Amino acid sequence: MSEINYVTKEGLEKLQAELQDLKYVQRPFITKQIADARDKGDLSENAEYHAAKEDQGLLEAKIAKLDDLLTKTRIIDESKLNTNQVMMLTKVTVLNHNTKKEIIYTLVNEKEADLKTGKISFKSPIGLALMNKKIGDICEVTIPAGQIKLEVLSISL
């Protein structure tokens, strides 16, 4: 059984937009490149043709992978989430005991993760350490920079 891909509504829209771009913008572009290269004569020695065909193969594989991912994708119903503990889609404010700074993270699917906006994957080291923690819980996390200690200050949606 394959793993279900939980996303936010925005995450689903982003995946769908990417698929639309691949199918209806990039696919016709590569098809045109192949046709143009084919018109240039002998295909056995036509590097443009072979490169375009290779690009087409890669694009079709990417489309198939994204199609498959979308069949396994489910939107998380935020109305059924609670703020008693950290879970996917919750916004958690933590105190980094090493730096004495407060940080706000939103736990999301790895495809939606964007550290610049405070969205981290629930499968990342910090995300895994915070999952199911309650307010007041302290966890230690090993990250590339070393060991950090985080205390959960608040949980919200």
Image (cartoon, rainbow, N blue to C red):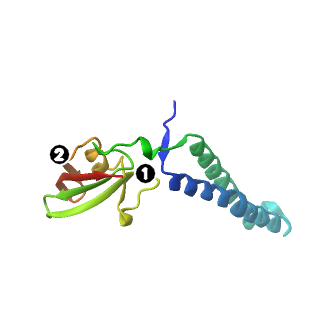
Q: Which residue is mark 2?
A: 137
Q: Position of residue 45 (x, y in %)?
A: 77, 64
Q: Is residue 147 visible?
A: yes
Residue 51 visible within the image: no
Q: Label 1 is placed on what type of residue?
A: Glu
Give the foreground label among 2 and 1. Answer: 2
Q: Which residue is nearer to you in this view: 97 or 76?
A: 76
Q: Give how far across and how far down residue 139 sits, in percent.
A: 18, 47
The disc labelled 2 sits on which kind of residue?
Asp
The reply to whether the C-beta atoms of the residues labelled 2 and 1 are less than 8 Å apart is no
In terms of sequence position, does the residue under pointer 2 or pointer 1 come before the other?
A: 1
Indicate left or right for 88 with 5 as reference: left
Q: Quadrant of residue 147?
A: bottom left
98 in relation to 110, above or below: below
Q: CA distance from mark 2 to mark 1?
A: 24 Å
Q: How many marks?
A: 2
SS at badge 2: loop
Secondary element at image label 1: loop
Which of 63/130 is in front?
130
Q: Is residue 4 left or right of residue 101?
A: right
Q: Residue at x 59, y 45 (%)?
A: 70
Residue 113 picture quarter: bottom left
Furthest-front residue in this view: 79
Q: Residue 34: x percent and y percent?
A: 78, 63
* Circle 1 residue: 110
Classify 10 Å Cα crowding around label 1: few (below 14), some (14-19), many (20 and above): some
120, 42: nearer the viewer? 120
Give the percent coordinates (x, y) of residue 76. 47, 44
Could you tell me which residue is drawn at 32 percent across and 52 percent down? 156
Mark 2 crowdedness (10 Å alpha carbons): few <14, some 14-19, many ≥20: some
